[in-house]
Image (tube, rainbow, N blue to C red):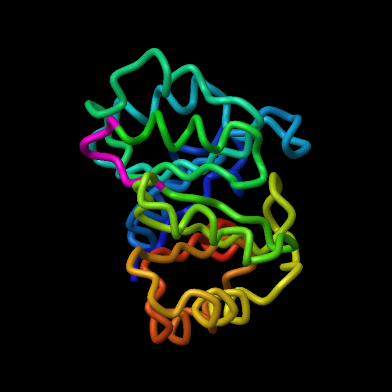
Amino acid sequence: MKISASILAIDEQNIKHKLSEKNDLYDLIHIDIADNIFCPTYGITENILKDLLKNEDYEIDIHLMMNSLPEFMINDNIDNTNISMISYHIESPLVNEFLHTMKSNKKIKTGLGILGNTDIQLLKKFLDNDDYLIDYVLLLCVNPGFSYQDPIISPIERVKEFKKSYPSYEGFISIDGGVKENMLTELYDLNVKIAVQGGAIFG
């Protein structure tokens, strides 16, 4: 299991320093990009994103919390970046457009995010549709947009719920929100591939 470090938990003035200081505690960098509409934050700024995309030492995991698609997905050649995975929420109105846009991508993994209070069964119409090329599901266990929250659902229980609902699912699972150190062994045993941690690393 890999650890993806959520930089939303870092003061923007200290991101480079903290990433360097804690680089032995994570495998990827988790970047939340939001529009202050889907959830009450803008996430990481475009300048910080562009700066990190220039650094080939980092593998980037992007989580979109938006009711639109960001410009870098539409106008830039994202294949030639250090982005390895991008997730977009099923609760967002352009989820079908996101999946269509990602179909032409040759390198970056396509993920579907789902909020902790959304019925897990709503993933079915996406996961059972062969027209969609979905590599992973991101299970969000906190209200989106801010670090240092208590989970609204236990990460372990959310994974178990997903696996019970989709026992033949062949993609991988990413879990985000309230993931503590004492959960990592059980999440690994549940075959979670990516565990996102923010405060647990940078707090």
Q: Is residue 106 shown in magenta? A: yes
Identify whether 20 is placed above or below 74. below
The answer to whether residue 146 shows anywhere in this view is yes
Q: Residue 98, percent across and down?
A: 48, 33
Of residues 162 and 132, the one nearer the viewer is 132
> Against 28, is 108 above or below?
above
Q: 127 or 138: nearer the eye?
A: 127
Q: Magenta stretch?
A: 104-110
What percent of the width, then of the height, locates residue 161? Answer: 59, 79
Q: Residue at x 49, y 26 (%)?
A: 48
Left or right: residue 50 compared with residue 65: left
Q: Nearer the viewer, residue 131 or 23?
A: 131
Q: Quadrant of residue 45?
A: top right
| Residue 203 visible somewhere in the drawing | no
Q: Position of residue 34 (x, y in %)?
A: 63, 33
- The residue positioned 70% from the left and 64% from the top of the image is 119
